[in-house]
Every structure is written in structure tokens, then in C-alpha cells.
Amino acid sequence: MRIREDLELISSWVKKNSRVLDLGCGDGNLLKILKEQKNVTGYGVDNDIYQIKLSLDNTINVLQLDLDDGLNDFKDDTFDYVILAQSLQEIKNPKKLLKEMLRIGKEVIISFPNMGHWSSRVQLFFEGRMPVTSELPYSWHDTPNIHLCTICDFENFCKENNFIISDSSITSRSVLDNIMIKILPNLFGQVALFRIQ
């Protein structure tokens, strides 16, 4: 089974025998891999009934919750890792959710599509339209994304709110982009991953 590159990297960051909460877990593939390869325990959370059914098919314990309502159902320090993979842009109040994630988890792992990637900039500049990319495949009128951001935006957001970034990785599907990421990550990175404490 082929999984997304950001999920592979997230999996490499998670230690064996950890307790994990995967927010916006989708089909549950990340937790399934973590259970099989790292013996983790935990839950997935999603609000889409179709995705919940897919998670259950993957034998994942999943809860139906709206992340915009908060994480009050979880006690402090319940998990080793709280993961939000490519769902940050769909959250109404990212600051509130990140604080909640840090309350219930020792470490937070977040990935999101980088709106600052050169392909988005080119579409906006030359076509004058909101970009549609492989990482952001929706038109402006039917997108679930309400808070698109760039890598620079997210780093500034963390600094302003005293969220400590302990590690990060910027990736792209393009070999050329991956070479250039070291020089200009905000311009050439398609997906950004951050570990926050």
C-alpha cells in the first residue's frame, strides 16, 4: 500500500509503543501503519461519516467529532503524539485547536499544503485565479479550506503564540523542487511538516 509522503515522515517521527491521537484521520491509514509497524495505541478523529467507515474497515478506533468544537473530551497529557495531517487549513480557529492539542499531547505533529509554492504563485499571477494544485485540488467555491497559509505564515504564527517548533521538514513531489527546498523552502516546498512542543 502506497501512503502519502507526509504520512511516511510522520510515521518515522513517532516512537514505538506510543499513544497517538490522529485528528482528521480520514481513512485511518496512518494509524493502521503505526499500529502494525510501531505497536501504537490510540484513536482517530473525523467528522465525515464516509471516512469514519473507512477507518473502521482498517480496524481503527475512531470517534466522530467536529474539531472546531474543541477537544474537551480528552484529559490533559493523554497522548504522546497528537497529529493533524493536512487538515489545519480546514480549521476555523487554528490557535485554539493547537493549544488544545498541546494540552492533551506531549508533542504535536502538523502537516499542511504550502500556499507559497511557486506553482500557486504562478497561477495567481498569470491567470488571476485562486490556485488549484495536487495538494489543494479544490476550486475556490467548493473548497473545505478556509485558512490557507505559507510556511512563513505558520512559522510566524508559532512564534507569536509561543509554540516551540522542535523539528520541521519541507517536501515536494518534484526532484528539482526538493533540491531547491534547501535554499528557498517557502517557494519550492509543496507540503510542510512541523513538530511542536
Image: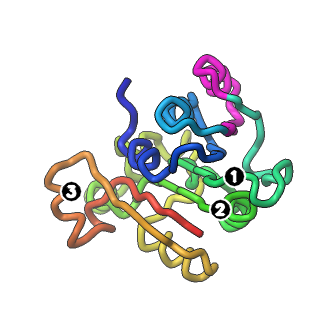
Q: Earlier in the sequence, mark 3 or mark 2?
A: 2
Mark 1: few, some, or many residues within 10 Å (few <14, many ≥20)?
Answer: many
Q: Give the side of residue 66 with respect to residue 29, left or right.
A: right
Q: Residues within 10 Å of mark 3 (few under 14, many from 20)?
A: some
State which quadrant residue 61 falls in.
top right
Q: Which residues are magenta?
A: 42-60
Q: Nearer the viewer, residue 182 or 140?
A: 182
Helix, strand or loop at disc 3?
helix
Disc number placed over residue 31 in the picture, else none? none
Q: Residue at x 55, y 75 (%)?
A: 164
Q: Is residue 23 above or below residue 169?
A: above
Could you tell me the amino acid type at mark 1?
Phe
Image quadrant in which you'd find residue 100: bottom right
Q: Position of residue 20 (x, y in %)?
A: 63, 45
Residue occupied by mark 3: 178
Where is residue 21? Give x, y as percent.
Answer: 66, 45
Q: Which residue lies at the image location 52% right of the left edge and 45% below the top edge? A: 16
Q: Which residue is mark 1?
A: 79
